[in-house]
Image (cartoon, rainbow, N blue to C red):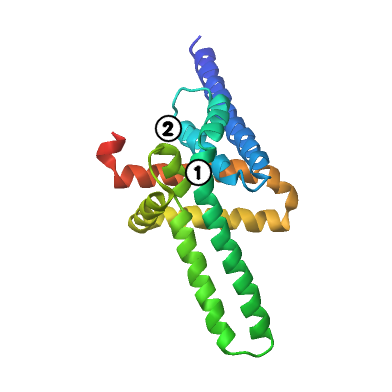
Amino acid sequence: MKPKKRLSEKRIRLLALLSKITDFLLLGLIALVCSLPVITLGAAAAAFYTVGLSLIRKEERSLYKTFFSVFRSEFRHVTPTWLVLLLCELLLAANAVFYFIMASNGAIWAQFGLGVCAAGVLGLSFAAGFVFPILAKNDDLLGRDAIKVSFYLAGRQWKWWTLKTVVQAAVFVAVWFVPFLVILAPGVLLFSNSFCYDRAFRAQFPKKTA
């Protein structure tokens, strides 16, 4: 009887693991679909991290209902911050293209401009690194304050920020070369980003987490 019991326990654990993997993949795809209008990406990101942290922390809640509830409730709160970040990204991209064209034509000064753009991308990455999960956790926090907290958290917990960034870059490269992996990419990012944010928050605010 004991071998059967052990086998049953293994099956239960396997089913639980498969269920969690399925949740990550499906919620990642739902977040991707909800982000397609672009303007909704901020609210989708807030919901994305809310359910991701719930999965990482094994909290008992209806994940799919939670996602759409947070998506609706956080839209007005998160969208202004997202639009500001989007505008900054577009300006950086436009400037980078301009400097790249000028550098290709032999303008040495344009290389300095590309360096400035690269520094801007790094700064923007620090600013936005943890801003959406922070906004999702704090309804009374304004966008500029959330960005300040994101800077602080990313700077103090740079190892987790670096790991998150490296995984993101690896996923984007994988999708670039193997496009059908886009189906799995959101789920992988949901797990990796939520894991890194959870560990960074626990390391920085252990008493608050406890």
User: Which quadrant does the C terminus fall into?
Assistant: top left
* Front position in the image: 86 or 111: 86
Q: Residues within 10 Å of mark 1 (few under 14, many from 20)?
A: many
Counting every numbered tag in the picture gives 2
Q: Answer yes or no: do the residues labelled 1 and 2 have beta carbons within 8 Å?
A: no
- In the rendered view, tell whether residue 10 sits above or below residue 99: above
In depth, the one of 136 and 1 nearer the eye is 136
Please state which amino acid type lies under the numbered disc 2: Arg
Classed neighbour count for the residue bearing mark 2: other residues with Cα under 10 Å, few (<14), some (14–19), many (≥20): few
Image: 23 above or below 156: above
Numbered disc 1: secondary structure: helix
Q: Residue 140 carries which label?
A: none
User: Measuring 37% from the left and 51% from the top, which residue is drawn there?
Assistant: 145
Give SS at disc 2: loop
> Which dot, 1 or 2, sits closer to the camera?
1
The one nearer the camera, 165 or 148, is 148
Query: How far across and how far down the image is residue 86, in percent?
Result: 57, 56
Q: Position of residue 77 (x, y in %)?
A: 48, 41
Q: Does residue 133 appear left or right of residue 94 in this picture? A: left
The amino acid type, in three-letter code, at marker 1 is Val
**Which residue is denoted by mark 1 in the rendering?**
78
- Which residue matches tag 2? 57
Q: Which of 142 and 8 is in front in this view?
A: 142
Q: Position of residue 131 (x, y in %)?
A: 45, 49
100 horizontally vs 135: left or right = right
Q: Residue at x 46, y 36 (%)?
A: 53
Q: Picture coordinates of residue 122 (x, y %)?
A: 48, 65
User: Between marks 1 and 2, how big is the CA–CA gap?
Assistant: 23 Å
The residue positioned 41% from the left and 53% from the top of the image is 144
Q: Residue at x 68, y 45 (%)?
A: 36
